[in-house]
Each structure stands twice: as structure tokens, then as C-alpha cells.
Amino acid sequence: MCHRCGYTPRFVLAREAQAAKKRLLKLRADTKKAIDAAKREVAQAVEAAKSALRFEKQAAKDKLAAKKTKAAGATKATGNKAAATKAAPKKVAPISKAAAKAVPKKAALKSATKKRSPAKKVVPTVATPEA
């Protein structure tokens, strides 16, 4: 702009218009980047919420399964105790002759020849005569 008459040459106006256009485009690009970043953040937050929900559901399932297992174990343990107390007084029935004959000879031979390892080796002590 001319300082005397207030006239602004066309090239100066064009340059200012170009600069304004450039600023506008930059602002639009920045806005678009900000919007995209916000969208990504929202998507991440939604995914995190879904993941947390899945985790909570799985934890609830695990807790329920553990509770069921514990309850089943408790009933099984009490059932085993009852069965043990009922079975304890009974004597073992002697093997009948028919059952004894049913055992194959090879199995009987194997069981007879099977060696048992001693639980503890005992070193025989020898009395030494004192002079």
C-alpha cells in the first residue's frame, strides 16, 4: 500500500490473497489431522473398553468355574469319606478257586519272580573282640 495515496498495487493484493489461501489450507490440514487423531483416540478407547469387558467376563467365568470345582471337590471329598467309612469294616473276600485258575500262568510267574528292592540297605555289624 502506498503511504501517500492509499493505493495497493495488484501484485501486493495477489500476494496477500495467496498467503491467506495458504494459511486457510494449512488450517484445514491441521483441523483434518486433529479430527483424525481424535477419531483414532476414540477407536482406541472403544477397543480398550471392549477388551476390559471381555476380561471381566472371562474373570467371572473363571471364578464361577473355580467355585463349581471347589464345590464338586468338597462333595466328592465328603462322598469319599462316607464310602471309606462304609468300606472299612468289610473284610477282603478270599479269592475263589475259579478266579485263581483264571489268572494266566505267565502273569503268575512274573509276579512270583519280580524282585522288590529293599527300602534301606542294612550294614551288618560285626562284633570285634577286644584284647
Image (cartoon, rainbow, N blue to C red):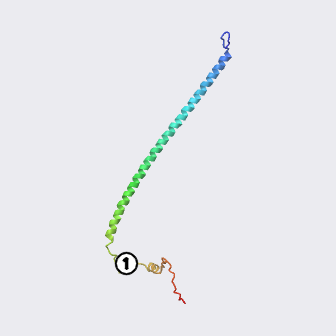
| Of the pair 67 and 47, the residue shown nearer to us | 67
The picture places residue 61, in percent across and down from the top left corner, at 41, 50
Q: Amino acid at mark 1?
A: Ala
| Element assignment for label 1 | helix
**Side of 95 where 6 appears, left or right:** right
The picture places residue 129, in percent across and down from the top left corner, at 53, 89
The picture places residue 45, in percent across and down from the top left corner, at 49, 39
The crowding category of the residue bearing disc 1, from other C-alpha atoms within 10 Å (few below 14, some 14 to 19, many at least 20), is few
Q: Which residue is mark 1?
A: 99
Could you tell me which residue is drawn at 41 percent across and 49 percent down? 60
| Of the pair 13 and 122, the residue shown nearer to us | 122
Residue at the extreme bottom: 131
**Side of 6 where 39 appears, left or right:** left
Could you tell me which residue is drawn at 43 percent across and 47 percent down? 57
Q: Is residue 129 above or below residue 10?
A: below
Quadrant in which the C terminus appears: bottom right
Could you tell me which residue is drawn at 42 percent across and 52 percent down? 62
Quadrant in which the N terminus appears: top right
Query: Residue 71, located in which quarter of the rendered image?
Result: bottom left
Residue at the extreme front: 131
**Side of 1 where 88 appears, left or right:** left
Q: Is residue 96 above or below residue 76?
A: below
Figure disc tally: 1
The picture places residue 109, in percent across and down from the top left corner, at 46, 81
**Side of 33 where 5 appears, left or right:** right
Q: Is residue 64 above or below residue 125?
A: above
Could you tell me which residue is drawn at 62 percent across and 23 percent down? 21
